[in-house]
Amino acid sequence: MDPVVTRFAPSPTGRLHLGHAYSAIRAHDHARARGGRFLLRIEDIDGTRSRPEHVATILADLAWLGLTWDGDVVHQSQRLDLYAAALDRLRAMGLLYPCFCTRAEIAGAMAAPHGATPVYPGTCRSIEAPDLAHPHCWRLDMTAAVARAGALEWSDAGRPVPADPLAQGDVVLARKDAPASYHLAVTVDDAAQGVTDVVRGVDLFEATHVHRLLQALLDLPVPRWHHHALLAGADGERLAKRHGAPALAALRERGEDGRELAERLRTGDFPKAVAVPTFTS
Ligand code: GLU
């Protein structure tokens, strides 16, 4: 079997909290326990929200937790050509369309089939002669993409999961304000970096349906996924959503022992907010 490669891929839009530490430790330990490699990727394609000072803090936080990573730290902002090439391929397949909708228009028109997450209603899908001089993002024509890729599945913690990207609607692959979206960049990078095992929070479980589809469309290798439960505060709310989740930097600055904290996170005496879904397949 190929050596295991995992990664931690934070967005430097704020300071890391305990939930990030937990996720980084899970990915790090997954690789280390198997003699594999652990990579660090900074997901900074969002030029308006990403801040260089957060990158320095993230590196210091991880070192404080006793985590080591292999190779150079990769920055998505330096890999835009790769994303543009993937976008060109999908466009050449006739699977993308420009969308001119504003946030307000989309918010008013989101279509939610009964009980499902609202998705983009496809307003711009069939514009005859789009005027690309106007601000636009690029969306994946999900129905066409799924028809082309056929039935897919992926593996989560060793269990097969049927891919259901249709439920995610026509997702954005290049933003109005950034040359790629999270979905596209993460899929391209995991393949380019040879990631074999994606260990991340279950909040990204639904996104995996889209990533699996993009891998099929772009002929990319398919990693294994291991979505983990999210840490919660005492009120049961997941940390990322709570006000006042302590930043790792704040704990570090007040002299707490990061390695000791990492050990406590490993031994699991922290409440979990969201359980990992179970499947019947
Ligand atoms: N950059 C994403 C985040 O900070 C994580 C990406 C991933 O693990 O796939 O939420």
Image (spheres, rainbow, N blue to C red):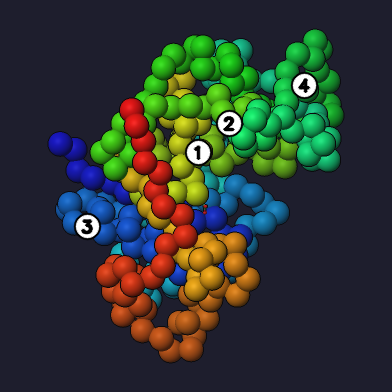
Q: Looking at the image, which is closer to me, 67 or 104?
A: 104
- The Cα–Cα distance between marks 3 and 1, rounded to whole angstroms, is 27 Å
Precedes in sequence: disc 2 or disc 3: 3
Precedes in sequence: disc 2 or disc 1: 2
Q: Nearer the viewer, mark 3 or mark 1?
A: 1
Label 2 neighbourhood size at 10 Å, few (<14), some (14-19), many (20+)? some
- Kindly state the secondary structure of the residue where label 3 is placed: helix
- The Cα–Cα distance between marks 2 and 3, rounded to whole angstroms, is 34 Å
Label 1 neighbourhood size at 10 Å, few (<14), some (14-19), many (20+)? some
Q: Nearer the viewer, mark 4 or mark 2?
A: 2
Q: Which residue is mark 3?
A: 32
Specify the quadrant that holds the C terminus: top left
Label 3 neighbourhood size at 10 Å, few (<14), some (14-19), many (20+)? some
Q: Which residue is mark 1?
A: 206
Precedes in sequence: disc 4 or disc 1: 4
Residue 247: tell me if it is visible: no
List x then y, in percent, for residue 140: 61, 24
- Kindly state the secondary structure of the residue where label 1 is placed: helix
User: Mark 1 and mark 2 in contact (Cβ < 8 Å)?
Assistant: yes
